[in-house]
Amino acid sequence: YRLLSMRNQCVLLFPGGAREVCRRRGEELYQLHWKEDVDFVRPAMRFNAIIVPFSAIGAENAVDVLMDSEDQKRLPVLGEAITKFLQENELDPDNLHPVTTFPRPERMYFKFHAPIDCSAPAFRNDSAATYQAVKRSVQRGIDELLEYQNSDPRRTALGRAAAALVPPHWEL
């Protein structure tokens, strides 16, 4: 809020918060976990900010979840300590980072979307519409990136190494 009220300040915000990072074992990859609350939009609208939605994939392909928050809380002895720590510090159990495999080299894909100007008439007074526009844009980008990822011959380390061995073909 304070950064938005200052001139020429950029703020990077993840509406899904830690829940999107702390996925569950067996959970489908790249799911948005945004709450229906539009709180992140209201300050942007108040200060006529420009929201630049972006989508990213690749990180969730790099690791496998071995133990999610629920698994960790069920561990003998340690699980009780984890639960007690979360309760004493009023922490959301969804924010407990999963135990994962060591990361594999995975290609990352990013897409930045058309900016949404909160001062534009379509968004100026409707935080729900602005929120939905941002969310739709991010989800559409994830879908597009997943489609691209599935056809990318350079997705894997082996694919990138093979591509590096082939000289580029230049047409004049």
Image (cartoon, helix red, strand yellow):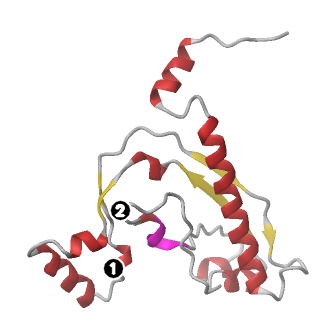
Q: CA distance from mark 2 to mark 1?
A: 15 Å
State the residue in front, 165 or 40.
Answer: 165
Q: Earlier in the sequence, mark 2 or mark 1?
A: 2
Give the residue at mark 1. 93
Q: In the image, is residue 164 above or below residue 27? A: above
Give the residue at mark 2. 25
- Which amino acid type is marked by label 1? Pro
Q: What is the x, y in percent for residue 113?
A: 74, 58
The quadrant where residue 65 appears: bottom left
Per the rendering, the mark at residue 140 is: none
**Number of residue marks:** 2
Q: Residue at x 60, y 41 (%)?
A: 149
Q: Is any atom of residue 121 visible in this view? A: yes
Q: Residue furthest left?
A: 77
The quadrant where residue 92 appears: bottom left
Q: In the image, is residue 5 above or below residue 72? A: below
Q: What is the x, y in percent for residue 162?
A: 52, 18
Residue neighbourhood size for the residue with mark 1, other residues' Cα within 10 Å, grouped as few (<14), some (14–19), many (≥20): some
Residue neighbourhood size for the residue with mark 2, other residues' Cα within 10 Å, grouped as few (<14), some (14–19), many (≥20): some
Q: Residue at x 71, y 59 (%)?
A: 140
State the residue in front, 81 or 148.
Answer: 148
Q: In the image, is residue 83 above or below residue 20? A: below
Q: Which residues are magenta?
A: 16-20
Q: Residue furthest right?
A: 121
